Image (spheres, rainbow, N blue to C red):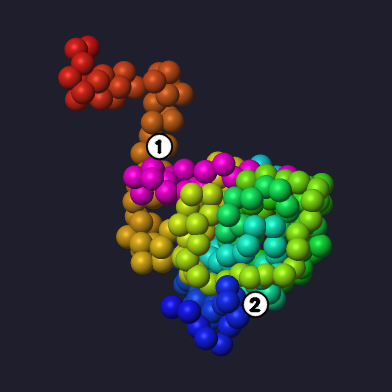
């Protein structure tokens, strides 16, 4: 629905209510791969690269979404001013890599405002500054060419980021393997699944370490596919 109070292509919607802190904390140590596995391996960003310089850094927070015209970052600056501590700013820049929409000066703002991280469906610059750490950031690529600040853009609307649909208020999880987004209505039912998945992987890891692999498990899978073993 087009809001008549905004010029064409512009819209700023209120921030969504935060996800319960205890629930965020419970997912903070959950690997992105486990979330993906438990949701059918059909979700998550494709082609995103971590630019924060620390392979052990993780990200977990409420999505604060932004849609911008390729190569323009006016509304990202507005989002930085609106987002609350712990929020993850998710930017749909249409996958454009010709101009960076986030740079080192914005990193300074993000750190000062204690944001949870940024995910950019587009390009970043000032890569050396981001690599100093202190603020998780994922993007499709990087370039020295900077952005314009003319708009238009929208804040807190559903976006597509690296093939991943993200709604404002979703939980965004990132680690060395990539980024996934989970709808807040799925979180409570997903939590026991990822815990069980982790326990099963621990069991498999122990068997692999002790015996070099689980022959029975693999043969059972082959039989289920009709293969004689």
Res. 34 image quadrant: top left
Residue drawn 17% across and 19% down? Answer: 226
User: Which type of secondary structure does the marked residue at label 1 adopt?
Assistant: helix
> In the displayed structure, does residue 97 sit left or right of residue 184?
right
- Residue 201's label in the rendered image is 1
Find residue 82 and name its label: 2
Q: Quadrant of the N terminus?
A: bottom left
Q: Residue at x 59, y 50 (%)?
A: 95
Residue 165 appears at what percent x and percent y? 45, 57
Secondary element type, mark 2: helix
Callout 2: 10 Å neighbours few (<14), some, many (20+)?
Answer: some
Q: Report the magenta residues as a range.
A: 26-53
Mark earlier in primary sequence (1, 2): 2
Furthest-front residue in view? 8
Say whether residue 45 is magenta.
yes
Which numbered marker is on residue 58?
Answer: none
Magenta stretch: dominant secondary structure: loop
Residue at 47% across, 66% down:
158
The x, y position of residue 193, in whole percent, is 34, 51
Seen at 67% across and 47% down, the residue is 97
Q: Is residue 214 visible?
A: yes
Q: Between residue 161 and residue 221, name the one nearer to us.
A: 161
Residue situated furthest bottom in the rendering: 5
Question: Is residue 30 something that shows in the picture?
Answer: no
């Amino acid at each position: 629905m087009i809001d008549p109070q905004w010029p064409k292509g512009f819209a700023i919607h209120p921030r969504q209510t935060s996800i319960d802190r205890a629930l965020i904390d419970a997912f903070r140590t959950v690997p992105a791969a486990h979330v993906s596995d438990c949701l059918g391996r059909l979700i998550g960003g494709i082609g995103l690269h971590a630019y924060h310089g620390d392979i052990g850094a993780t990200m977990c927070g409420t999505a604060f979404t932004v849609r911008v015209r390729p190569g323009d970052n006016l509304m990202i600056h507005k989002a930085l001013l609106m987002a609350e501590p712990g929020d993850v700013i998710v930017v749909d820049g249409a996958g454009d890599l010709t101009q960076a929409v986030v740079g080192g000066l914005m990193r300074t703002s993000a750190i000062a405002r204690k944001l949870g991280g940024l995910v950019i469906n587009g390009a970043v610059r000032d890569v050396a500054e981001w690599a100093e750490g202190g603020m998780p950031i994922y993007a499709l690529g990087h370039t020295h060419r900077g952005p314009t600040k003319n708009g238009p853009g929208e804040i807190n609307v559903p976006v597509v980021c690296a093939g991943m649909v993200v709604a404002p208020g979703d939980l965004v999880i990132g680690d060395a393997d990539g980024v996934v987004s989970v709808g807040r209505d799925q979180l409570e039912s997903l939590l026991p699944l990822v815990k069980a998945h982790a326990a099963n992987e621990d069991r498999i890891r122990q068997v692999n370490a002790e015996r070099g692999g689980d022959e029975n498990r693999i043969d059972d899978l082959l039989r289920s596919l009709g293969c004689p073993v």
